[in-house]
Image (cartoon, rainbow, N blue to C red):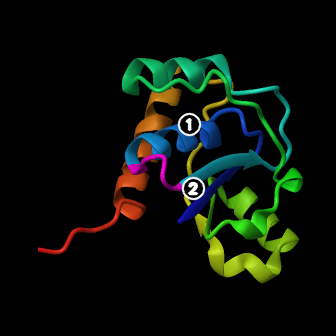
């Protein structure tokens, strides 16, 4: 399985989703993140701190990159983290639209730490609900 998380700037939501997914799903799955228009060099300080404090995940090494710089067709699941990104991806890559999923998550950029904490917990819950394989008993 391969998963690509996409947000606008690849500085908050998608790096947090990448870090959380790698923790929850394991390293055997290809998990990456990108943004429509990355503005920063990497993850924001607040995103780094929230994942470190709440989940002992280190995303300080994250380097922001544009979805235009990767081969999006290599991913089975492409998760857009807001409606604007979802629509932009569908317009740019209509042949891949069946692979797109929308998780409409508020961008915490520029807000306080509680917004980042809420975003991390929302993403964690969505990963556990939608990406963790279901066990049959």
- Which image quarter holds the C terminus? bottom left
- Res. 89 image quadrant: bottom right
According to the image, label 1 marks what residue? 16
**Closest to the observer, 18 or 38:** 18
Q: Is residue 98 magenta?
A: no
- Res. 134 image quadrant: bottom left
Q: Residue at x 67, y 47 (%)?
A: 33
- Res. 13 image quadrant: top right
Report helix, strand or loop for mark 2: loop
**Horizontal placement of 132 versus 60: left or right?**
left
Q: Residue furthest front?
A: 28
Name the main secondary structure of what is drawn in magenta.
Answer: loop
The percent coordinates of residue 99 (x first, y second) are 64, 75
The percent coordinates of residue 105 (x first, y second) are 56, 49
The percent coordinates of residue 123 (x first, y second) are 47, 46
Residue 50 visible, this orientation = yes
Badge 2: residue crowd in 10 Å (few <14, some 14–19, many ≥20): some
Q: Residue at x 41, y 44 (%)?
A: 124
Q: Residue at x 75, y 27 (%)?
A: 42
Task: Say if 23 sits above or below 71 in the image.
Answer: above
Magenta segment range? 25-29
Q: Residue at x 52, y 28 (%)?
A: 116
> What separation in Å lies between label 1 and label 2 (alpha carbons)?
15 Å
Check residue 104 in the rendering and tell me which mark sits there, or answer none. 2
């Amino acid at each position: 399985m391969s998963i690509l998380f996409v947000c606008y700037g690849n500085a908050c939501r998608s790096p947090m989703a990448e870090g959380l997914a790698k923790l929850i799903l394991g390293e055997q799955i290809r998990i990456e993140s990108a943004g429509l228009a990355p503005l920063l060099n990497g993850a924001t300080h607040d995103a780094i701190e929230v994942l470190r404090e709440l989940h002992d995940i280190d995303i300080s090494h994250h380097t922001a990159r544009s979805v235009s710089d990767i081969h999006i067709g290599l991913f089975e699941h492409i998760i857009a983290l807001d409606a604007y990104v979802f629509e932009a991806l569908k317009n740019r890559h209509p042949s891949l639209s069946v692979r797109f999923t929308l998780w409409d998550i508020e961008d915490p950029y520029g807000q306080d730490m509680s917004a980042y904490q809420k975003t991390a917990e929302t993403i964690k819950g969505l990963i556990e609900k939608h990406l963790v394989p279901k066990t049959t008993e």
